[in-house]
Amino acid sequence: MDIVVLGSGNVATHFGKALSDAGHRVVQVYSRTKANAKILASAVKADAIDKLAELDLDADVYLIAVKDDAIGQVVTQLPSSLEGAVVHTAGSVDIEIFAAHVKRYGVMYPVQTFSIAKSVDFSMVPIALEASDEATYTQLVRLAGSVSKRCFFCDSRQRLALHIAAVFACNFTNHFYAIGADILGEYSLDFDLIRPLILETAQKIMAHQPQEVQTGPAIRNDIGTMQKHLKLLEQSHQDLVSLYRQMSERIYSN
C-alpha cells in the first residue's frame, strides 16, 4: 500500500519504518518542521513536506502519528475529498474525531512505548484496530497484520481503558523508577543496584497476574518497616509521604 505518514516523532518513526520494511511504500512524511520530516523521510525513501496543501491525494492510507491534542488540528485541515483511509495511532482519541471531516477512517493503536533511539521488534507489538466501515477495517487488518503478529478489534471506549492501563503500567512505573534513582543518589548509591530487582519483577508478571506476585512490606502489613520508610521520606521527600501511604494502603487492601 502507499502510505503518507503525518508526524515525525517516536510513534511515526517506528511505524513508518516498520511499514516500509514490510514492503509498503511510504510516499510522504509530513511534519510542521521540515527538518524533522526529512529525517524520517530519508530513512523510508519518501518525500518530506511541511504543508498539508502538498499532500499526495492518491495514497491508500494517511497515518496520523502526532501528539493526541494535535490530531484534531490535523484532521480539520485534510481535504474532504481524500479516498484513502485516514487513521490515527492514539490510545485516548475517539474514532469519531474523523466523522465530520473524511470519508473513510480508523485507528491503529500500537500498545508499546517508543523512543527513536531504541529499536523495537514491531512484530511483537499488539495493535488495536477500529474503523468506520467493514471494508476499511479489512484494509487495516491487512496493513497492521503485515507488521504485527497480534492485531485485534478494540472500540474507542475499550481503547481508552487500554491506554489508561498502559499509563499506569508503563509511564507511572517509569516515574517510580526515577523516584527510586533520586533516593539512591541522595545516599551515594547507584541505580544499577536495583536493575536486577526491576528485571525480576517484570519477568514474573510475564507468567503470572500482577496480584499473584506482589511482594514488599505493604502486602505483609509490615507496619514497623513502613514507619521507618515514612520517617526517612519525611526528612527529604515530604511530597512522597502521602503517595507512599496511599500506595501501601491500596496494595494491602487488594
Image: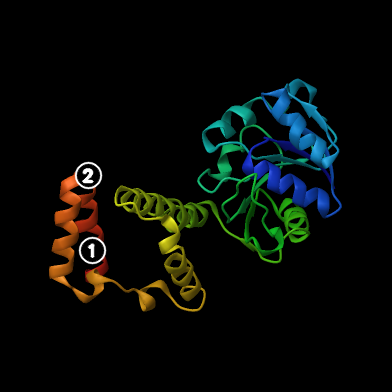
Q: Nearer the viewer, mark 2 or mark 1?
A: 2
Q: Which sits earlier in the primary sequence, circle 2 or circle 1? A: 2
Residue closest to the eye, 5 or 179: 179
Task: Please tell me which residue is depicted at 18% across the width and 54% down the height of the picture.
Answer: 232
Name the side, left or right, on which 229 lies relative to 24: left
Residue closest to the eye, 100 or 88: 88
Please count the marks in the image.
2
Name the side, left or right, on which 133 lies relative to 114: right
Question: Looking at the image, can residue 87 be seen?
Answer: no
Task: Please tell me which residue is depicted at 16% across the width and 49% down the height of the picture.
Answer: 234
Quadrant of image for the C terminus? bottom left
Q: Which residue is mark 2?
A: 239
Task: Please tell me which residue is depicted at 60% across the width and 49% down the height of the picture.
Answer: 114
Residue closest to the eye, 120 or 7: 120
Residue 90, relative to residue 22: is it above or below?
above
Query: Can you tell which mark lies on residue 248?
Result: 1
Q: Position of residue 151 (x, y in %)?
A: 67, 62
Name the kind of residue labelled 1 in the image: Ser
